[in-house]
Amino acid sequence: MIIITLSGTDGSGKSTQAHAVREWLTARGERVWMFHAVEFSIANRLLRQTAPNRSSRSVTRAGTLRIFLRIVALHIDYIRFAFLRRRLRRHGYTVILSDRFFFDTVVNIRYLQRTTRCGYLERWVPPVDCALYLEVDAETLRHRERVPEQGEEYARKKSALFAQRRDRWNMILIDGTQPIDTVRNTIIHTLTHRCSL
């Protein structure tokens, strides 16, 4: 089983491209499980149960306790993911395709901590076979159909946090400013030639 991840700032086109890649993989005969680290998160599941009417707006500020709880939840999610991967393998899945992986969660935590340092959180992200990063500058995001609700400064800071970590995570840069079909074709070409799919 291989793991393919799509990461990037909000509005970079991850979800759109993940669905296109899933169709391509399925047409090739792969059995694909779609994964989304935010939806998978034990913290988000608990929040939905305790506050079902809570706003879906992204969090841009958090206190020390909430950040600590997010870090604890992330470690629990790493363990849960290992069990999920084993279960999917037993059921014949060949690919886990992630629209937002734990990379994105770590960057979100670092953003909330208001720190640029790298540390143990970055090292403990489960290994993947092909990590793709959709690079879109904040100016381009502002003119997209789906503008990120958090604003341009938020996008700029998260892009900078990703830039510091991309080499450590062996991310392959994809120019997300191109037309949707061009981006999709670039991703498919990358998966075929650089990720041996």
Image (tube, rainbow, N blue to C red):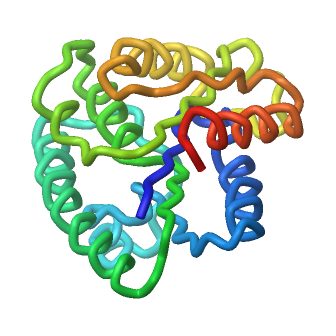
Name the quadrant containing residue 122: top left
57 left or right, relative to 166: right
- The answer to whether 55 appears left or right of 176 in the picture is left
For the point 31% across and 81% down, which residue is it? Answer: 87
Q: Residue at x 33, y 25 (%)?
A: 111
Viewer-proximal residue, 89 or 109? Answer: 89
Q: Tell me the quarter of the image containing the N terminus.
A: bottom left
- When the figure is inspected, residue 14 is found, relative to residue 148, above or below; the finding is below
Is residue 174 rendered to the left or right of residue 84?
right
Please name whichever residue, 141 or 196, is drawn nearer the observer in this view of the structure: 196
> Residue 172 location, x and y as percent?
53, 26
In the figure, 172 relative to 71: above or below? above
Report the side of 37 relative to 155 (left or right). left
Q: Which quarter of the picture shows residue 31? A: bottom right
On screen, 102 above or below 180? below
Q: How many marks?
A: 0
Residue 38: x and y in percent read 41, 56
Residue name at image x 66 percent, y 15 percent: 138
Whole-percent x and y of residue 173?
58, 22
| Image point (34%, 84%), residue name | 90
Rendered location of residue 102, percent (x, y): 34, 46
| Quarter of the image where one finds residue 152 | top right
